[in-house]
Image: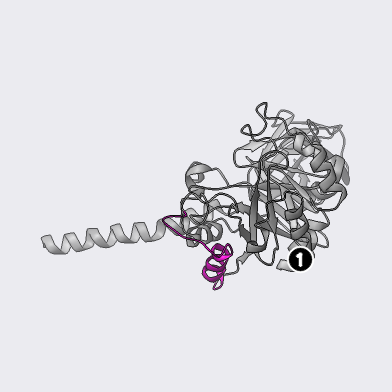
Amino acid sequence: MKNLLSLSFLFVLNFSFAQAPHSHAHNRVIKFPDVPGYKSIITDFHIHTVFSDGSVWPDIRVQEALRDSVHAISLTEHLEYEPHKEEIPNPDRNHSYVLGEKYARPYRLMVIKGAEITRDMPPGHNNAIFIEDANKLEIADSIEVFRETQRQGAFVFWNHPNWVAQRNDGVARLTDMHRYLIKENLLHGIEVVNDLTYSDEALQIALDNNLAIMGTSDIHGLVDYQFDIAGGGHRPITIVFGKEKTADGIKEGLFARRTVAYFDNTLIGRREHLIPLLNASLTVQKAGYQGKADVVDVKIQNHSSVEYILGNRSEYSLHAHTDIVVIPPHEIVNIEVKTLKRYAEFELAFEVLNTVIAPNTHPTIRLKVVTE
């Protein structure tokens, strides 16, 4: 009997542990709807492993990305900084990619070949992705290495321009070298979000210089620990709007600057890219007046992983909310609107407070309501 009870306990314990990863993976999934004409592709193009200064083998990066439902990653190892070189010799600078691509092959995860060009400021640190050969980027001249990325057809973005190790005030600023790189089409994007930081100044640089707005984890340790996944956090990512969910579709979308960064439950991007995403994310499912009252129930559904924080900017006041409405991820929220008289259809306007289209600027969306 004792043995039977012990076996039963072990069965229950094993079953519980077997179920936990599935449930946890579901809760952490990053998901956004497609927008008219484009696929919404979830990417993280700044990641490290033990082949530079990261703490894990490439298969862990693949597993983390799969659990987060990321569609594409790049293992961007430092070219000039290899603290584990004695323990893990790395004569081929493409080896991290080779391993990552092998581990990802059975799954629907794209691994894009990339590397981090690690220099003092200027030009600071820059990632080159969609490269052909990382070995050919080991060039001392800081301009010539960018010219080699161009010969390889790479997309290049400036990493953490607000990094206090290179900007002690935390303010991203263009240098003459960066202006030259942009002018020569050698620099195509900038991290507005890196790891746990966001930069208003980097966003303004992106808007002023037609650079892609990038958000990355720059993960060195474990994604789960760094971004408190168990506590409801998420890794920073870049949403690329591609014509197709392929490597070529991502590359075309990046060069076209069709990107939005997702960071700390906030979306950052250009108005022309954010508004279609918000319109696809928030839709009116149903609306109807309450009996004979001039108060209408409006059910708004959220099709994304963002908990949207909406400020009412309509001409109508709300009956069961203040002027702030929160729409949790993948849920439907009913709001009661006082229209004062009955309409067959009307429009609601909301400022989306946790989205940014320029420093201190939030877009407003308009939802058409058709009553039953």
How are the colours assigned in the image?
Answer: one colour
**Is 97 colored magenta in this rendering?**
yes
| Residue that badge 1 annotates | 249
Q: Residue furthest front?
A: 140
Residue 238 percent across, percent down from the top left: 69, 51
Residue 213 percent across, percent down from the top left: 76, 46
Q: Residue furthest left?
A: 1
What kind of element bears circle 1? helix
**Is 206 colored magenta in this rendering?**
no
First to last magenta residue range: 85-106
Q: Is residue 115 left or right of residue 299?
A: left
Residue 136 percent across, percent down from the top left: 67, 63
Residue 315 lies, with reference to residue 20, above or below; the image says: above
User: Residue sitting at 62 percent across and 59 percent down?
Assistant: 73
* The one of 29 and 85 positioned closer to us in this rendering: 85
User: Residue sitting at 78 percent across and 64 percent down?
Assistant: 151
User: Residue sitting at 56 percent across and 49 percent down?
Assistant: 81
The image quarter in which residue 349 lies: top right
Q: Residue furthest bottom?
A: 106
CA neighbours of label 1 inside 10 A, class few (<14), some (14 to 19), many (20+): some
The answer to whether residue 282 of the structure is visible from this angle is no
* The one of 306 and 127 positioned closer to us in this rendering: 127
Residue 347 percent across, percent down from the top left: 86, 42
* The one of 54 and 363 positioned closer to us in this rendering: 54
Instruction: Please state which amino acid type lies under the numbered disc 1.
Output: Gly
Residue 181 lies, with reference to residue 40, above or below; the image says: above
